């Protein structure tokens, strides 16, 4: 194994979470995260969320690639973005709105804090 190469994998210990109760707008979403990198302000791995809708506010920059499922990301007072398998996108610091998982969604992510 090399220190300078990592594969995105779900062979690491998963972390389980959910939005704070005051952020949930519908459903009972649950998150599973397989974080393979946490260093120098960079996080990356794989994330899975079950159906529901919650408020989001990004204080970080994030690149995502949807692997499975269907979600809708909506900016406060702005546009809604349908997210399905194959979609890649960036969420910039300062984004506020909602994330709705219509069908369980799996994404790969890279976050810079």
Image: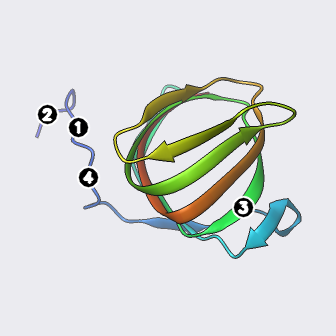
Q: Are marks 1 and 3 in contact (CB under 8 Å)?
A: no
Among the two numbered marks 1 and 3 on one chain, the one whose residue lies closer to the N terminus = 1
Mark 4 vs mark 3, CA separation in Å: 26 Å
Lateral position of residue 53 relative to residue 33, left or right = right
Label 2: state its secondary structure: loop
Label 1: state its secondary structure: loop
Mark 1 vs mark 2, CA separation in Å: 8 Å
Q: Are marks 1 and 2 in contact (CB under 8 Å)?
A: no
Mark 2 vs mark 3, CA separation in Å: 40 Å
**Outermost residue, bottom direction?**
28
Mark 1 vs mark 3, CA separation in Å: 32 Å
Q: Position of residue 53 (x, y in %)?
A: 72, 61
Which residue is labeled 3 in the image? Answer: 53
Category of crowding for the residue at label 4, using alpha-carbon neighbours closer than 10 angstroms: few (below 14), some (14–19), many (at least 20): few
Lateral position of residue 12 relative to residue 35, left or right = left
Corner quadrant of residue 37: top left
Q: Position of residue 70 (x, y in %)?
A: 49, 56
Which residue is labeled 4 in the image? Answer: 9
Lateral position of residue 92 relative to residue 75, left or right = left
Which residue is labeled 2 in the image? Answer: 2
Which residue is labeled 1 in the image? Answer: 6
């Amino acid at each position: 194994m090399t220190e300078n190469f990592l594969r995105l994998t779900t062979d690491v210990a998963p972390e389980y979470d959910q939005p704070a109760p005051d952020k949930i707008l519908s459903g009972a979403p649950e998150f599973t995260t397989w974080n393979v990198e946490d260093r120098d302000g960079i996080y990356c791995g794989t994330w899975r969320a079950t159906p529901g809708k919650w408020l989001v506010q990004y204080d970080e920059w994030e690149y995502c690639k949807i692997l499975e499922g269907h979600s809708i990301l909506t900016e406060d007072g702005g546009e809604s973005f349908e997210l399905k398998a194959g979609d890649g996108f960036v969420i910039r610091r300062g984004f506020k709105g909602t994330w709705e998982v219509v069908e369980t969604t799996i994404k790969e992510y890279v976050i810079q804090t």
